Amino acid sequence: MTTPSPSPSAHAHARLPGEQVVLGRDRPMRLDSGVELGPFRLAYRTYGRLNADKSNAVLVCHALTGDQYVADTHPVTGKPGWWGLMVGPGRPLDPDRYFIICANVIGGCMGSEGPKEIDPATGQPWGLSFPVITIGDMVRAQTLLIDHLGIEQLFCVIGGSMGGMQVLQWAVSYPERVFCAVPIATAARHSAQNIAFHEVGRQAIMADPNWQGGSYLTRNTRPTAGLAVARMAAHVTYLSETALHTKFGRNLQDRSRITFGFDADFQVESYLRHQGISFVERFDANSYLYITRAMDYFDLAAEHGGVLANAFRVAGPDGTARGTPVRFCLVSFSSDWLFPTSESRAVVHALNAVAANVSFVEIGTDKGHDAFLLEVPEFYQVVRGFLDGQAEHRGLTRRGS
């Protein structure tokens, strides 16, 4: 496979457009591993305007390979934001109504504290000395950002895939700070199959000689081949068999017959190679290790005695347990085999067990897991309908005032 020649990331330590705040100055943030992190940087973007009573804030949580550039041009690739179908004028998340926030997760590689950033203790990139993080740690860092912005309660937390895990963690850990939640194409825990796929990707990266035990940035190299393979393997899981067949079938790539060799004879091979090559331009290999591991560790039920419903119980004024006050809308996709509908139903059943306010929709589509990022009109109609209903209940006007 052809990959870019190994070279340090062009944006490894560059100042990226958008906001960046230093958090944990007064008190370090304690991670689930027991390590204390701070001060640390969190990079984010905002769209729209916070209203007078600060009741229109929406937090968008990104997926594994996403970042804070949800609705504007990406500074590295020059491509449009990854969720322009959801965020923007006339979209379900309209900046004329909502103040929209999206932060790069800790452990990420677009300005937030992570393995490619500089460890102040050494003056060198953190590499594998960066502490292992969890979904809970990502959310804990986001709460510090929300505090920094002076917001007491978010109108909505929304996200798909790993973003949906963050949404669920927000609702469980900070139910008083979330009015409504939209977890999309996600689960309350990472399955053994998904952990297995992640391990294949991690091993591809670590097997690349240019990985250098995670110290590639200090040695002026990058494990581009390994990271590209990891991306190719993962990308297959984001699609469905039907989508692959419809888009590519067994069509040959720029040739009329097979070559009896190992070049990209088939269109699907060429497509995956392109996905791998373009990915290494914008993502850090060590961040891929850290973020996939955070997803693997995610298990809400394990944190609550093995009973998922217990995760959605809160203490009432009299001290007795009651159902969460958060209003939920869960969405799954019929052809998603990475996070199948059964995973969303398990969350719905847990919420029903505590009499929570929850709605659930399975969208019929052949687009697979990535459907939440693609043109699926029914999906956006469902989200718009739910958000409009909650906004009306909350008294939010179109101008966000």
Image: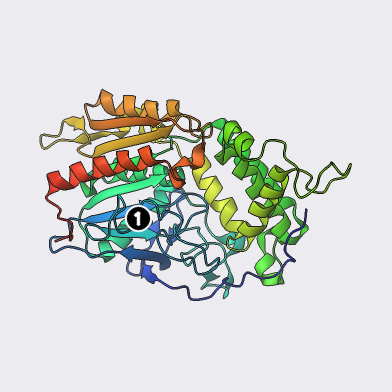
Give the farthest residue toward the front: 256
Task: Find residue 329 and report its horizontal and vertical position in percent.
Answer: 29, 36
Q: Is the C terminus in the top left, top right, bottom left or bottom right quadrant?
A: bottom left
Q: Residue at x 34, y 35 (%)?
A: 330
- Check the image and report above or below for 6 versus 82: below
Task: Find residue 361 and report its horizontal and vertical position in percent.
Answer: 34, 31
401 and 67: which is toward the camera: 401
172 and 110: which is toward the camera: 110
What colouring style does the render use?
Answer: rainbow
Task: Find residue 229 and report its horizontal and vertical position in percent.
Answer: 69, 49
205 and 26: which is toward the camera: 205
Horizontal placement of 267 versus 314: left or right?
right
Q: Residue tagged by mark 1?
A: 87
- Check the image and report above or below for 181 versus 332: below
Task: Find residue 202 and report its horizontal and vertical position in percent.
Answer: 65, 47
Q: Residue at x 62, y 69 (%)?
A: 9
- Check the image and report above or below for 242 versus 296: above
| Amino acid type at mark 1 | Val
Is residue 300 at least partly visible in the picture? Answer: yes
Give the farthest residue toward the right: 260
Q: Name the quadrant containing residue 187.
A: top left
286 and 396: which is toward the camera: 396
Q: Residue at x 52, y 56 (%)?
A: 131
Horizontal placement of 211 versus 120: left or right?
right
What kind of element bears circle 1?
A: loop
- Check the image and report above or below for 378 versus 225: above
